[in-house]
C-alpha cells in the first residue's frame, strides 16, 4: 500500500502546471526548430504490461483444429508496445514475451503477419533499442521525426539515442510521473487498461 501512496504523491507533485507548461514550451521549440511539415512525422510510443495465462491448463486452438492442452504452472508477462502518429494512424502492435520458449509468442507469430513479436533474452533496455530498429523502416521516410516517449531508462539508453540522431529522430521524453495526464497513448489507447489495474 505504501508504494501506491508514494506513486500517487509523485504524480500529484508532477501535475504542477509549471512543469507541464515548461514541457510544452520545449515541445513548441523542438517543433519550430525541426521544421516538420506533417503530423505523421510526430510519433508517440508507449507500452503496457499484461499477465496472461493461469495456473493449470492452457488450451491452444488453431482454426479448424481441436485444441491441444498444455500444463503450465505459472503466468507469463507480456509487454505490448503501441505506436501512433499525430495524424491518428496506429502502427501494428508489438508484443514482447519474457520467456525464451513462449507458447503464446509462437501462436501469435504464426497467426499475424502485421504485428512484431519479440522474445526478451537480454532485458528490456537493449530490447527496446532492437525493437525500434525493427520498426524504423516503417516510419515515414520524411525526416526529421519527433518521437515522444516516457522517461523509462530504456528510452535513455545511450546507444539508442546516438542511433536515433543518425536517423534524424529527435527523442523527447515526457516529464516524470505525468504520462497519465499528457502522453497521448497513455490517455487514449492504454487508458482503459490503466483503469483496470
Image (cartoon, grey):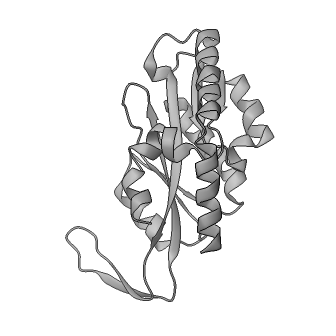
Location of residue 81 in the rendering, given as x and y in whole percent from the top left corner: 50, 49
Q: Residue at x 62, y 13 (%)?
A: 34
Side of 192 relative to 127 (left or right): left
Quarter the C terminus occupies? bottom left
Location of residue 50 in the rendering, given as x and y in whole percent from the top left corner: 47, 65
- Asked if residue 62 is positioned above or below residue 173 in the image, the reply reads below
- Asked if residue 181 is positioned above or below residue 117 in the image, the reply reads above
Q: Is residue 139 visible to the viewer in this orientation of the structure?
A: no
Q: Residue at x 50, y 56 (%)?
A: 48
Side of 91 relative to 7 (left or right): left
Quarter the N terminus occupies? bottom right
Number of dots carrying numbers? 0
Q: Residue furthest right?
A: 158
User: Camera-side residue: 18 or 96?
Assistant: 18
In which image quadrant can residue 19 be found? top right
In which image quadrant can residue 162 be found? top right
Location of residue 60 in the rendering, given as x and y in whole percent from the top left corner: 33, 76
- Asked if residue 40 is positioned above or below residue 100 in the image, the reply reads above
Q: Residue at x 73, y 38 (%)?
A: 160
Side of 158 relative to 197 (left or right): right
Q: Is residue 34 visible to the viewer in this orientation of the structure?
A: yes
Q: Residue furthest left?
A: 64
Q: Residue at x 39, y 46 (%)?
A: 189
In which image quadrant can residue 21 be found? top right
Location of residue 39 in the rendering, given as x and y in whole percent from the top left corner: 44, 19
Amino acid at each position: 500500500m505504501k508504494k501506491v501512496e508514494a506513486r500517487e504523491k509523485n504524480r500529484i507533485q508532477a501535475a504542477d502546471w509549471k512543469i507541464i507548461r515548461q514541457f510544452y514550451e520545449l515541445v513548441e521549440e523542438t517543433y519550430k526548430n525541426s521544421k516538420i511539415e506533417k503530423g505523421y512525422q510526430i510519433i508517440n510510443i508507449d507500452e503496457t504490461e499484461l499477465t496472461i495465462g493461469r495456473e493449470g491448463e492452457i488450451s491452444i486452438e488453431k482454426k479448424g483444429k481441436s485444441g491441444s492442452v498444455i500444463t503450465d504452472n505459472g503466468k507469463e508477462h507480456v509487454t505490448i508496445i503501441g505506436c501512433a502518429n499525430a495524424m491518428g494512424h496506429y502502427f501494428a502492435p508489438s508484443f514482447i514475451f519474457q520467456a525464451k520458449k513462449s507458447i503464446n509468442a509462437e501462436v501469435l507469430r504464426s497467426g499475424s503477419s502485421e504485428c512484431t513479436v519479440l522474445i526478451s533474452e537480454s532485458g528490456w533496455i537493449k530490447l527496446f533499442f532492437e525493437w525500434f530498429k525493427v520498426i524504423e523502416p516503417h516510419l515515414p521516410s520524411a525526416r526529421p521525426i519527433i518521437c515522444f516517449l516516457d522517461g523509462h531508462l530504456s528510452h535513455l539508453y545511450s546507444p539508442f539515442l546516438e542511433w536515433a540522431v543518425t536517423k534524424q529522430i529527435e527523442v523527447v521524453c515526457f516529464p516524470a510521473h505525468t504520462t497519465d495526464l499528457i502522453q497521448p497513448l497513455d490517455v487514449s489507447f492504454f487508458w482503459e487498461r490503466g483503469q483496470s489495474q
